[in-house]
Amino acid sequence: MTIDPNQFLGIPSPGAENADALLLPLPVEKTVSYGRGAGGGPRAILDAGLQIETFDEETLVEFAEAPRLHTLPPLTTDGEIEDCLSTIREHVRPWRERFLLALGGEHTVTHGVVTGLVDDPAEVVVVQIDAHADLADELDGRHWSHGTVMRRLWERGCRLVQIGVRSLSREEHRLAAAGPRITTYYAHRLKDQWSEVLETLRGLEGKVYLTIDVDGLDPSIVPSTGTPLPGGLSWRQTMDVIRAVTAESRCRLIGGDIVEFVPSPASPGCDPTVARLAAKLLAWWWVGRGNAR
């Protein structure tokens, strides 16, 4: 098989129109407030993906056969973050009938992808793995920011299921406790609430979008992110979440993203881990559609 370095896992593309799933690199880094480098995340994931086996032993998916994947060209945008999100939204809109996995880039891109995939965000449940609630009304004087993205989606009517949160302001805590359509599972309570988390996910119906901020995982797994914090999800817990949403519920997963990954300063670091995370999400999505296994 000829290796294509611009296609995820190096597998030659069948063409966007013939693909079962699309990957969209979004090297966006405009509102980062601490550690920088997330703009290089998509390219690092694609590069590391060349070292990932095309066969997944857990799902029995062989990516060289199916699902057929196509990686779209990276979408780069100029201007302010609002213009960037508008561009993402319009770019995603034609691909609504395909499963789309975005590779960030900062977490703000989630808003552009979700609003591009649906006309009415109130139809969507956003499942969020994250160390941060991202429910601030403003961050560093910005209305649009990686730290306000979930607030903006919630204001548009999305229901939020947040998993692994362990950093938020008092205002965000109050909103998470009192705001309708927000269910927050804090990291310090996950051990006792894990069965409830999975039950909630398995009970989801309708349109669901899965966003994975890599700082939601414990930094022993992915230390290379802008704001790493101890006490995150284990790899197995992350797989449990993905499996529950894709293969154990009656929902329709319309898309997802992996964001806030900063390429490891010393190669290979955790770059292959994040590429493996992307492959796992795609494999379980395919199984959830009644394939493989």
Image (cartoon, rainbow, N blue to C red):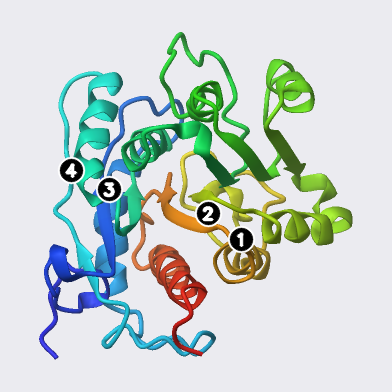
Distance between the Cα atoms at labels 4 and 1? 30 Å
Up the image or down, 134 lies above or below 113; here it is above
Distance between the Cα atoms at labels 2 and 3? 15 Å
Q: Are marks 1 and 2 in contact (CB under 8 Å)?
A: yes
Residue toward you, 196 or 3: 196
Q: Which residue is mark 1?
A: 220
Asked whether the viewer can see residue 37, the reply is no
Asked whether the viewer can see residue 257, the reply is yes
Residue ranking furthest to the top: 141
SS category of the residue bearing label 4: loop
Q: Residues within 10 Å of mark 3 (few under 14, many from 20)?
A: many
Residue 66 picture location, percent across and down = 31, 83
Residue 104 picture location, percent across and down = 34, 46
Residue toward you, 262 or 129: 129
Given the image, on which type of amino acid does mark 2 rest? Pro
Up the image or down, 144 lies above or below 164; here it is above
Residue toward you, 49 or 212: 212
Q: Which residue is mark 4?
A: 75
Q: Which residue is mark 2?
A: 223
Q: Residue at x 25, y 67 (%)?
A: 47
Q: Counting residues from the N terminus, which is met first, the one under dot 2 or under dot 4?
A: 4
Side of 195 relative to 273 (left or right): right
The mark found on residue 40 in the picture is 3
Given the image, on which type of amino acid does mark 4 rest? Leu
Q: Residues within 10 Å of mark 1 (few under 14, many from 20)?
A: some
